[in-house]
Structures are given as C-alpha cells and as structure tokens.
Image (cartoon, rainbow, N blue to C red):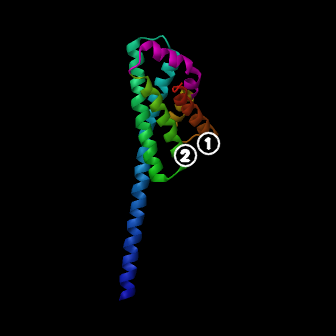
Amino acid sequence: MLFGVLLVSFAISAYSNLEYVKNEERVASSLVDGSGFHVSILADDIMALASSYDSDPERTRFLVASAVVNSKALATLSKALNDLEGDEHYRKWYLVYGSLFMYFAGLTGKEHEDIVNKLSEDGEALQKIAAVLERAGSSTNPFEIQREELDNLVDLASALVTSGND
C-alpha cells in the first residue's frame, strides 16, 4: 500500500514538473515570436535616423521615441527570456537592447540640432547595428545570430552609451 501511495505521488510530481516545463517553453516561445515585430521596427527606425540627419525635427523626434519604446520592449523581452532560460545569449541581447534604450532615451528632450549632431557622430555604428537587427528581425527567431556577431553588437551598442558620456 505504501509503495502504491509513493508511486502515485511520484507520478503526480513528475506530471506537474513536466507541465511546468511545457508552460515555460510555451512562454519562451511566445516571447520569441512577439519580438520579431519590435526588432524590425527598431531596425527601420535606427536606419532612418542614421541616414537622414537633416530630416524634419518632428519626424526625428518620432523616430527617436519609437526607438525608445521598441528598444525598451526588446530589453524587457530579452530579460524575461534570460530569466526563463538562464542563457548567456539572452543576457547579451538584454545588454544590446538596454544600451540602445539608454542611448535613444538620452536623445529625448534635446534640441534638434544636438540630436542631429549626435546621430551624425554615431551614424556608422548605428547603420551597422540596424543592418544586424534587420537580418535578425527577418528570421524566424530574431535572437538567433552568430555568437561573434552578437558580441560585436554588444560592443557597438555599449560604445554608443559610453560615447554619450563625453
């Protein structure tokens, strides 16, 4: 009888653990699926900002605000994936998107001329970042890029933030 109770208890415990893992995998999959949209928009915004320095001030402010919102959303998604998966890969994405959030948030509230000067100064790095994000956003899993490319992206995004502290 005791063996039967232990067996049933073990079966219930195993089933509960399996259901937890399945739920966790579904949550992670949903987070990945929902991120592609934000990655594509962020890539477009960054490319537009990096290539048209003398654009309309209202358009520039809109693109900066959009980059702030989308980079913040992606930083949040990356953090959640890192918390679920415990994967260094997602932590690096969190660093990329968190750095981009800080960079673009730092541009909000500045005079248009100052924004244009900063974008012009960082144009090459922004174009490189946008190109990688564009490729990532068009794939099934926007978090899947080569490790070296992700490391380079972390360096580029981090450099943008540190260059803003001059």
Q: Quadrant of residue 3?
A: bottom left
Give, as a single range, the part of the protein colored magenta: 109-128
- Verify CB contact (< 8 Å) between mark 1 and mark 2: yes
Q: Quadrant of residue 106?
A: top left
- In reply to whether residue 123 is colored magenta, the answer given is yes
Q: Residue at x 54, y 32 (%)?
A: 157
Instruction: Bin the neighbour count of mark 2 within 10 Å (Cα to Cα): few under 14, some 14-19, many 20 and up.
Output: some
Q: Is residue 93 left or right of residue 19?
A: right
Cα distance between the residues tagged 1 and 2: 8 Å
Q: In this rendering, does residue 140 appear at all?
A: no
Vertical relation: 42 (above or below) 78: above
Q: Residue at x 55, y 26 (%)?
A: 163
- In reply to whether residue 96 is colored magenta, the answer given is no
Q: Amino acid at mark 1?
A: Arg
Q: Residue at x 51, y 27 (%)?
A: 165
**Main secondary structure of the magenta stretch:** helix
Q: Is residue 162 left or right of residue 104?
A: right
* Residue 61 in picture, x, y percent from top left: 39, 19
Q: Amino acid at mark 2?
A: His
Q: In this rendering, does residue 47 appear at all?
A: yes
> What SS does tag 1 mark?
helix
* Residue 155 in picture, x, y percent from top left: 59, 34
Instruction: Bin the neighbour count of mark 1 within 10 Å (Cα to Cα): few under 14, some 14-19, many 20 and up.
Output: few
> What SS does tag 2 mark?
helix
Pointer 1 or 2: first along the chain: 2
- Quadrant for the C terminus, please: top right
Question: Could you say which disc has been placed on residue 147 in the image?
Answer: 1
According to the picture, the residue beneath numbered tag 2 turns out to be 89
- Quadrant for the N terminus, please: bottom left
* Residue 47 in picture, x, y percent from top left: 51, 22
